[in-house]
Amino acid sequence: IKNIAVLTSGGDAPGMNACIRAVVRTGIYHGKNMFGAVQGYQGLINNNIIPMNARSVSNILHMGGTILKTARCLEFKEDAGMEIAFKNLQEKEIDGLVVIGGDGTFTGAKRFGEKFGINVIGVPGTIDNDLYGSDFTLGYDTAINTVIEAIDKIRDTADSHDRLFFVEVMGRDSGCIALRSAIASGAEAVLLPERETSLKELITKLKAGASTKKSSSIVIVSEGNKYGGAYDIAKAVKRKFTHYDTKVTILGHLQRGGSPSGFDRILGSRLGFAATNALIAGESMKMVGLKGNKIGLTSLSEALSGLGNYKLEDDLLEMTHVLSI
Ligand code: ATP
């Protein structure tokens, strides 16, 4: 490996900059020429591939978002788009690629690597924690902290007014953010896409809380759950349970931004360092991930075929039932 390019693709996630910094500096440390593709795969196609040095990544460790920008690039899904991307890389003699993103990004990387034999390593970057092969994905911890901070504030007003709040959080089909946020914010209940809680059960739980003089209740609604959005659920519950004044908050995109937590800065650094070292060691078509506090490699095929097998932590869900009485 002589020349390495790094890119961020799909949704942005806090910690991506820490990872870019680690990739660039690790490569430079080992005497490689480093490049950054701007706007993910779109940058490869547009030949927006810029040289990077150790100073290009100064003062970005603490920043949310991604200095390299990210994009959803439909052209890269077509063979013609991939060919242009490869030609642009060839021109610069770039023979190694680190892609930071989610499952779509890895699907693209796998196809690209198979088709052109370029060396590729993936880094799991998404707040949703919905990838197989890493206990934590980059940005997940920061998103949880953002949700907790918001719910702490909601709790103040909920408590002062005896209110029931439905707070909708992100995660698409993954309830990971919702579950961990529920524990850390002391939510009374959580609705997840992966596990069914009927509205009847939810109402029984809220009634039990009211009868033991809870002054407020917070229900976290994960966006992919089967009963719909927080407004729909609030409406349905209100019809049968009127003890509290009911309010809804949808946290939305603020969950994607912000300065990365200490955990994500360290994780981004570790994953970027490991991804570059793996490329230099001759690895390809793999993803780096955190497995029980060690960084390990998973083949892209296994990571993609294991999608949906990321574990919802049922032991934590059990615990919320006990701790929220
Ligand atoms: P997030 O989980 O945050 O959405 P993601 O990486 O899954 O991240 P996608 O938009 O699904 O986000 O994918 C990112 C990019 O990867 C796409 O815009 C496209 O350029 C590329 N990509 C996705 N699927 C394919 C595919 N089948 N073939 C080639 N490229 C793909």
Image (tube, rainbow, N blue to C red):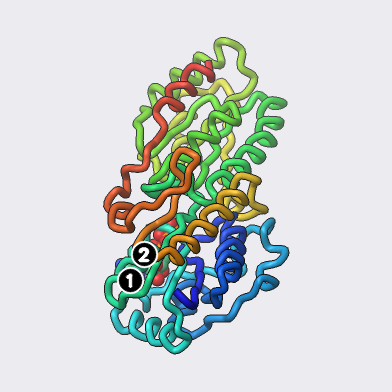
Q: Point out which mark residue 130 bears.
A: none
Mark 1 or mark 2, whichever is nearer to me: 2
Nearest to the observer: residue 89 or residue 259: 89
Q: Secondary structure at mark 1?
A: helix
Q: Secondary structure at mark 2?
A: loop
**Quarter, ligand 1:** bottom left
Nearest to the observer: residue 125 or residue 169: 125
Give the x, y percent position of residue 94: 45, 80
> In this image, 308 relative to 254: left or right?
left
Q: Is residue 22 above or below residue 229?
A: below
Instruction: Name which residue lies at 43% across and 83% down.
Output: 89
**Tag 1: residue type?**
Gly
Q: Which residue is mark 2?
A: 284
Instruction: Name which residue lies at 48% across and 34% down.
Output: 179
Can see residue 230?
Answer: no
Classify mark 1: residues with Cα within 10 Å, few (<14), some (14-19) or many (20+): some
> In this image, 59 relative to 192: left or right?
right
Q: Which residue is mark 1?
A: 113
Give the x, y percent position of residue 22: 59, 61
> In this image, 238 relative to 111: left or right?
right
Q: Is residue 14 above or below residue 142?
A: below
Instruction: Name which residue lies at 45% across and 84% down.
Output: 93
- Cβ of mark 2 under 8 Å from ligand 1: the answer is no
